């Protein structure tokens, strides 16, 4: 059952990365990367149980925090000019 | 001062639960980190009644139980519409009015809306929330205002 | 008793996997950015909770369960914050529903300070 769940998570990660590559906009890509990160947290915890080493959970906690910080960090730059597509086109 | 004590108790519990080691070295390292974190929190001036809403603690479990039920129902609704396809969804923006008085009540309400799949709070100005919803039914449910009433009850 | 716990753990894990895959189908299938965000919301609330509860039942060791609980609470607090930040950034940059099907090579000009 653990292995089935791990495979399902891997399939979902492939779907997320497909959306990340397809786009079509910047925000779709950020959304896909965020989803990929949260699924990675689940994958790490599941793999810890599959391999019989629940110590992996510490890594999962740290990864959850890093993923959050990275998304907020990217969005922090949404004030800068490279993000302002439609406003820039008007000039 | 009361908030500082509660923050340090929370941090001590968090350290003990996460580490699971009881040697002197580990405990003293934990002590140093906790003191350092509290020092940083004081420098950033974030220790106050909004960072630790203790006055809400007693009422929270009932609200969480109700919110869990809502989240489960909304999840199955959204999953049903994912498999039914694009024809069955009716995405729309709408504006709703919140009746909470304090900032923390508004934030709890906005976060509850976002946490329920099918509705996302996009913008928040004064007591007007801009919400994007996947289905017309969820808009109707929000406008009926049960969640609003429960969060407002939590406040006083 | 042991078989009961094993079976319920399997049921939780399978439900979580099904919800996760539904969310993945949703992110590929839905037509625009804001609706895709709802599909991601499914995988971040109930699917995560189901899989973590399944793992908790699978291994009834106290410290492991506490860590799984911390991951669950953390992801439930983090995911609405991240999706609100994303949605309001999209809204702030005048990203309305009509121009969101353009490829972003048309939208993003090269950055020259």
Image: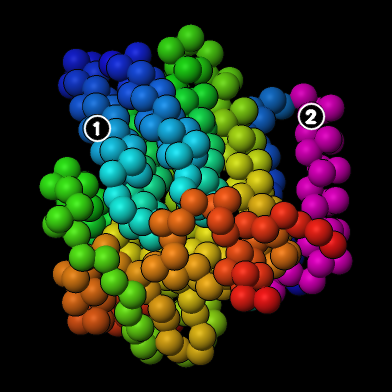
Check chain identity for marks 2 and 1: say if they share one: no
Q: Main secondary structure of the magenta part?
A: helix
Question: What is the CA distance from the residue labelled 2 to the residue labelled 1?
Answer: 42 Å
Occupied quadrant, residue A57: top right
Image side of residue B78 versus residue B64, left or right: left
Image side of residue B141 versus residue A53, left or right: left
Point 13% across, 47% down: residue: B84
Which residue position holds label 1? C18
Instruction: Please give the count of numbered marks on the rendered protein.
Output: 2
Secondary-structure class at tag 2: helix
Q: Position of residue B21 (x, y in %)?
A: 69, 25
Pick the front one: B124 or A86: A86
Point 66% across, 70% down: residue: A88
Q: Does the image show residue B40?
A: yes
The quarter in which the N terminus of chain B is drawn is: bottom right
Q: Is residue B136 positioned above or below C26 on the image? A: below
Disc 1 is attached to a residue of which chain?
C
Q: Position of residue B78 (x, y in %)?
A: 22, 52
Q: Which residues are magenta?
A: B23-48
The quarter in which the C terminus of chain B is drawn is: bottom left
Is residue C44 highlighted in magenta?
A: no
Q: Is residue C17 positioned above or below C111 on the image? A: above
Pick the front one: B30 or B68: B68
Q: Does the image show residue C12?
A: no
Occupied quadrant, residue A77: bottom right
Q: Position of residue B17 (x, y in %)?
A: 60, 36
Q: Residues within 10 Å of mark 1 (few under 14, many from 20)?
A: some
Q: Residues within 10 Å of mark 2 (few under 14, many from 20)?
A: some
Which residue position holds label 2? B26
Q: Is residue A52 positioned above or below B13 on the image? A: above
Q: Is residue C3 positioned above or below C87 on the image? A: above
């Amino acid at each position: 059952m653990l292995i089935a769940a791990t495979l399902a998570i891997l399939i979902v990660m492939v779907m997320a990365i497909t959306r990340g590559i397809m786009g079509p906009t910047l925000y779709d890509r950020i959304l896909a990367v965020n989803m990929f990160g949260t699924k990675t947290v689940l994958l790490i915890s599941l793999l810890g149980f599959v391999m019989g080493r629940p110590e992996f959970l510490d890594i999962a906690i740290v990864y959850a925090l890093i993923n959050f910080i990275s998304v907020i960090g990217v969005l922090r730059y949404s004030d800068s000019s490279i993000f302002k597509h439609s406003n820039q086109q008007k000039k | 001062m009361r908030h500082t004590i509660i923050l340090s108790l929370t941090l001590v519990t968090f350290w003990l639960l996460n580490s699971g080691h009881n040697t002197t070295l580990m405990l003293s390292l934990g002590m140093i980190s906790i003191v350092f974190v509290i020092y940083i929190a004081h420098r950033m001036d974030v220790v106050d009644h909004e960072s630790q809403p203790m006055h809400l603690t007693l009422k929270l479990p009932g609200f969480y139980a109700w919110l869990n039920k809502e989240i489960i129902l909304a999840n199955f609704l959204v999953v049903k519409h994912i498999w039914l396809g694009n024809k069955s969804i009716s995405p729309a923006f709408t504006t709703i009015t919140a009746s909470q008085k304090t900032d923390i009540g508004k934030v709890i309400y906005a976060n509850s809306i976002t946490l329920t799949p099918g509705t996302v709070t996009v913008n928040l100005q004064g007591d007007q929330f801009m919400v994007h919803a996947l289905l017309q039914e969820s808009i109707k449910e929000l406008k009926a205002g049960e969640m609003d009433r429960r969060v407002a009850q939590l406040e006083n | 008793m042991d078989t009961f716990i094993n079976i319920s753990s399997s049921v939780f894990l399978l439900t979580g996997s099904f919800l996760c895959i539904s969310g993945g189908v949703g992110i590929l299938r839905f037509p625009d950015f804001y609706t895709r965000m709802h599909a991601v919301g499914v995988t971040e609330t109930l699917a995560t909770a189901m899989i973590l509860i399944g793992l908790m039942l699978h291994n009834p060791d106290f410290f492991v369960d506490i860590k799984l609980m911390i991951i669950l609470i953390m992801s439930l607090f983090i995911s609405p914050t991240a999706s609100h930040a994303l949605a309001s950034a999209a809204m702030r940059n005048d990203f309305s529903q009509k121009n969101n099907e353009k490829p972003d090579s048309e939208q993003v000009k090269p950055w020259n300070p």
